[in-house]
Amino acid sequence: MSSIEEVLRRTKTITFDCYGTLIDWRAGLSRSCAELFGPSVTDRTDELFNSYVQIEAEVEAQPYQPYRQVLSTVAQRLALRFGFGLPPERADLLAEMLPEWLPFTDANQALVRLKKRYRLGVLSNIDRDLFAGTARHFDAAFDFVVTAEDVEAYKPAHPHFERLLSAHSKSDEVLHVAQSLFHDGVPTGRLGIAYVWINRYKDANETTVRPLATYPDLARFAQIACKDADD
């Protein structure tokens, strides 16, 4: 396997997952769920997050539907599982609140630093209009964005990455950076795309995914990726 230094020397484009990698989805989801279901949900945060991830993956594995509808379905199923009161007309509010979720504190500085050296892209399980709301929180402009709406599929399915390779980069010139081993590590491994794991939560890797490198945050990754330029 090539080292991170070898891969970075030939990398021209760096792509990111957005929610969980650039955007602090746990903090955003926590606030949104408290608004939807009431402040008592904060006592069950870990259980709620685990259920959210499981339910979302189940919904996204079904025939494609817009992410707004995915979020509405997830909200309704969470309410049913945990016994929360949620009138059907409020289920759509989760999507309305998503564009207010904020970046991790190190994300913007890292993106600005990386932008000086690389083309930057986003591959995200999102609708175009929802990402447009999120994009206003970033200080660096992305060269391209591939959404679930663009390819009518959700990671870990391959269409995001196939669109990346067909329209935006050669496989040996791109490096994908993401938090989720499931959504991003698995498909990049199958398609031969170099993958860096951002492991902010110090999770154990209990999968068969073998990242090229692992960093605790984007700041550390940007430091490594831009080392030669800084020197």
Image (tube, rainbow, N blue to C red):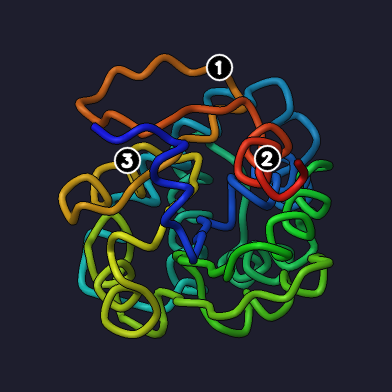
Residue bearing mark 1: 202
Q: How crowded is mark 1: few (under 14 residues within 10 Å), some or many (20 or more)?
A: few
Q: In screen coordinates, is 10 left or right of 16?
A: left
Is there CB contact under 8 Å for labels 3 and 2?
no
Say which quadrant the C terminus sits in: top right
Mark 3 or 1, nearer chain start: 3
Say which quadrant the N terminus sits in: top left
Q: Which residue is drawn at 62% across and 84% down?
A: 129
Q: What element carries label 2?
A: helix
Rounded to the nearest angstrom, the CA distance separating label 3 from label 2 is: 29 Å
Q: Position of residue 106 (x, y in %)?
A: 80, 42
Residue type for callout 1: Lys
Give the numbered dot on residue 141: none
Front residue of 228/160: it is: 228
Mark 3 or 2, nearer chain start: 3
Front residue of 62/107: it is: 107
Residue bearing mark 3: 182
Q: Residue at x 70, y 64 (%)?
A: 115
Residue bearing mark 2: 227
Up the image or down, 64 lies above or below 156; here it is below
Q: Which of marks 3 and 2 is in front?
A: 2
Q: In screen coordinates, is 209 left or right of 169?
A: left
Q: Where is residue 174 in the image (x, y as percent from the top left)?
A: 40, 61
Residue type for callout 3: Phe
Q: Position of residue 193 (x, y in %)?
A: 28, 53
Residue type for callout 2: Lys
Q: Is mark 1 on a helix, strand or loop?
A: loop
